[in-house]
Image (spheres, rainbow, N blue to C red):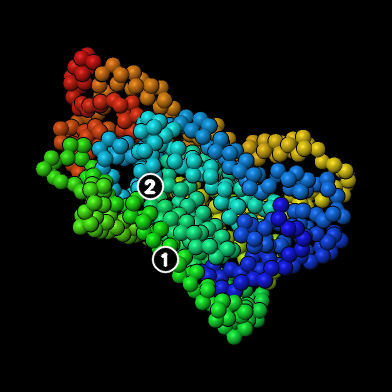
Amino acid sequence: MGHRGRLSPTATVTVLSVALTRADMGGRSGNQDEEHGADETDEQECDSGGKEMSEPASGETSDTPDSSASDGTLVNLFDRYESVTVFRVVGAVVVLALVLRLVDLGARTAHWDEARVAYWAYFYQETGSLAYYWEEHGPLVQLAAARLFDVFGVTDFAARLPVAVVGGFLALVAVLFREHLRRSETVALALLLSLNPVLLYYSRFMRSDVLVAAFMFTAFGLLVRYYDTRRAYYLLGAGAFVGLGFAAKENAIAYVLTWVGATGLLAVQMLLFDGKATVDRYSPLHGEGWRPQASSETLRSTGVGIVAFVLAFLTTIGVTFLPRGQGLERRLNPDPGTEYVELGAALARPGQFVSLADDGLRTAYEGYLDWFDQSADASSGTYTEFFVEYLQFLLEYAPLLVLLGVAGFALEFTRRSDARKLVTFMGFCAAGSLVGYPLASHIQGDWAWLSVHIVVALTVPAAVGLAWLFRTGWREFEARFQPERLDVALAVTLVVLLGLLWFWMLPMPSVYLDHQAEDNELAQFAQPNSDLKPLVDRLDAIADDGEDVVLYYGEQGESYDRGVALVHPDISSGVGGWQIHPTCSIWGNTQPLNWYFAVADADPTCERSPDALTESVAAG
């Protein structure tokens, strides 16, 4: 363990994009707790670089009482058992998160959106062709899923696995904020990121929202770590994760805009509550950090870090967005006379690589513009309706997180100049996301998955609220019962009971038990409410026997309804541009069947004539 005791670190004054100071974010001198009459400090470990950790907010009890306090508290387990560290506890939470996400991962029938994205991942595996298309987001998840199909086969499990793994490791981001949060708050943050029903459901879903949220939240954590340590490799990692965020989904740009807005609100807060000290701190005439030597060192370090950030970002974007094979042509039988530039060959020929990179980045740029135009057009006159839906959804599926988040933000914000800027910053991000995402909503029910981004931001103030609630409750318990010693078995029992309460008293059944129910807003209306697994098993058996699957829609003339028809009026005409197997099917109406044809490796055909259908069945 590192040095323990009251810490009074001097903040290094440097202008960052988030305008955070270490002292403001938690490195304050701990004052005496007047309410409880205990002089307690938040004793934290030093990091590997020898920098001291931040202290708790004044007026609060710390996670680790001093020697005069009772050692029979749960929070004192960190001190009573040397093997119990924040890293190990968070690691255990990550293992739990992965188990919760992987168990029975392939059981649910594929959602329409899942089937669409998974099909193009399968198409890439089969043909080597893939390119970014804004309606499907990505292309990161397709790239990852296609590689996993090689290992696990073409299954729902393999399609969802990239999101499940990233969602499970999201809890690990909590340790990046360890210098600005108490140990109990760091663990609470990991738990909230692991157990929130919204995050859990969409970590078991082949959508890119959890991916972009995880990557951008990790990037922000790495930026904070760079601020703490001035080590350039944190900026290198941040650039790579921002690139992954942009490669996952277009609303990565919304995170950047949210950070900018939250920085402005943070600056207003600092000027409002402690204006003179803030001006002095950042003034070149008064700020200690503006001395020529310190400024030169800071500029040199920052310059190296920025270059590393940009290079990592561009490299990640380049690798993911460059088109493969046919790109967006998506032909099952491409013209043999057409030559396509392969990524590997382009790397060996600089001229071809420049052309390929230009094509990929131009496609990405145009796709992002289309995505923004769609969001802007759809939001007119519907903002209030969508905003109310977001609120209702969060209160129904993340009620504790909302309550704890509001409480944690209020506890910190009312500390005025002593408020930790990390906590208020993330509170501003959550509020900004709640206000902003209804503007981007364009279909009914999209608040379910877009709420992921509000939830992730809200977990930081919620962790503060949860840890405060636990400390307050435990002090009451000690005052009433005065336990001399807390048995580890009792601690484990309490954790298990709390876990069961969390699981069954909150909307957790919506994740596992009624994940296809019509009244489950997490599922959204494009989720089939019937189990297609028996059909898939039958398809497997048919495909194994070499028999065909027939799609039939026999209505003729004016009665033909494209809105529900499974096949095109002229089944020999194909689909035109993109070729979805079978080409005679109407993609929007047959999904997720097209995906399950791929899963079963079936060879479907289409019929419009009852006589032809009879002949096909008889022949099969």
Residue 408 placement, left or right of 155: right
Within the image, what quadrant is residue 606 found in? Answer: top left
Q: Residue at x 60, y 52 (%)?
A: 175
Q: Any mark on residue 514, and which?
A: none
Can residue 605 be seen in this snapshot? yes
Residue 364 placement, left or right of 405: left
Tell me: residue 29, above or below residue 140: below
Q: Residue at x 59, y 77 (%)?
A: 289
Q: How many marks?
A: 2
Q: Position of residue 386 (x, y in %)?
A: 48, 54
Q: Which residue is mark 1?
A: 307
Tell me: residue 18, above or below residue 616: below
Residue at far bottom of view: 285
The one nearer the camera, 306 or 358, is 306
Residue at far left of view: 337
Question: How would you rate the neighbour count of disc 1 (Cα within 10 Å): few for under 14, some for 14-19, many for 20 or more?
Answer: some
The one nearer the camera, 566 or 339, is 339
Kind of residue indicated by mark 2: Leu
Q: Residue at x 87, y 55 (%)?
A: 68
Q: Which residue is mark 2?
A: 140
- The local secondary structure at tag 1 comes to helix
Q: Position of residue 552 (x, y in %)?
A: 25, 26
Tell me: residue 287, above or below residue 79: below
Q: Residue at x 29, y 52 (%)?
A: 322
The one nearer the camera, 260 or 582, is 260
Residue 415 placement, left or right of 199: right
Q: Position of residue 264 (x, y in %)?
A: 53, 71
